[in-house]
Image (cartoon, rainbow, N blue to C red):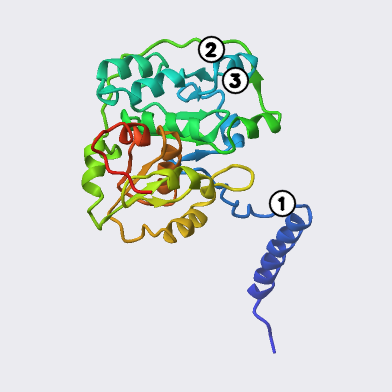
Amino acid sequence: MHQHPYRYVVMSFIWMIASALLVGCTSGQVPDAPQATVPTEEKNAMLITPQSLEARLTDKTLRILDVRPAAEYDAGHIRGAVRIDLAAWKSLGLSDGGLQDATAWAKNVGSLGIGLKTPVAVYGGKLNDAARAWWILKYVGLSDVRLLDGDWAAWKAAGRPVETNAVNVTPTDFQPRFQGDRLARTEDVRRYGNDPKVVILDARGAREYSAGHVPGAVHLDWNDLLTDSGRFQSPQELRAVFEKVPVEDAQTVVTYCKSGSRSSAQAFALELAGYKNVKNYFRSWQQWSSEVAAPVDR
């Protein structure tokens, strides 16, 4: 059979393309493969890892806060971290009307050089101390406040950047926007005691709880929310712990301890686990036990 003259031209062209592709592949010149997506932290995540924080040390928009005592801060702190006088913050928060003192909180927070939308990372020597600062900052209106996962111990153990010189910042004209839905007052706790839709959690130790607690409060030691290394458990693990209390059917969960630090950590864990409408009875047992008419269960 007589073959069409154009057939040789077409076959030659196909052979040339195939050869070029073969050479390209054998020389490593292959089409770019889809790159794996690098996991990133959620914009409003509650925890920040030491690795992620180190990567942001040059981020001028981020404020890092150290809640440890002055001597520990001076001996070494995360590069760029500003110290909070947490003892003064605690004293103000536990005083009559202290949590509603807009002038005082404007000064305390403004002196750190931050505003309502400033992203903040908090750490300390004790997780519950850092949690206290976290809760106060959220209460006065900051939108993005994270705790350093593993706290100062994890940062130091990993040999990450540390400095000893004090960090000076330019104060801001901070105006607090108190988030009243985060706070439970004594009168609220009195009312909640008879509400089946509210669960009150006592974050103290078993002996403290047995010696006296708010009527109707359920005991859940805040240490039960942590791993063996002292970090918060994962959201899934935390939820499993809270389901045993249980708080699943509650519309509101109130936390308290002795003076607001452990209850702040428990409130953090509840939010980390995905619970909404979590209130911190910040003045806690210190206030409740001082009320002459406040009932006590043992």
Is residue 197 in sight in this rendering?
yes
Question: Helix, strand or loop at disc 2?
Answer: loop
The amino acid marked with disc number 1 is: Gln
Question: Helix, strand or loop at disc 1?
Answer: loop
Give the mark, 1 or 3, whose residue is nearer the N terminus: 1
Q: Residue at x 34, y 32 (%)?
A: 283
Q: Position of residue 35 (x, y in %)?
A: 60, 51
| Residue labelled with disc 3 | 79
| Residue labelled with disc 1 | 29
In the picture, measured across the screen, residue 58 lies left or right of residue 270, that is right
Estimate the spatial distance between the alpha carbons at disc 1 and disc 3, rounded to whole Å. Answer: 44 Å
The amino acid marked with disc number 2 is: Val
Q: Position of residue 277 (x, y in %)?
A: 30, 47
Q: Position of residue 122 (x, y in %)?
A: 49, 29
Mark 1 or mark 2: which is in front?
A: 2
Q: Position of residue 184 (x, y in %)?
A: 28, 39
Q: Quadrant of the N terminus?
A: bottom right
Question: Helix, strand or loop at disc 3?
Answer: loop
In the picture, measured across the screen, residue 156 lies left or right of residue 53, that is right
Q: Which mark is residue 266?
A: none
Q: Which mark is residue 167?
A: 2
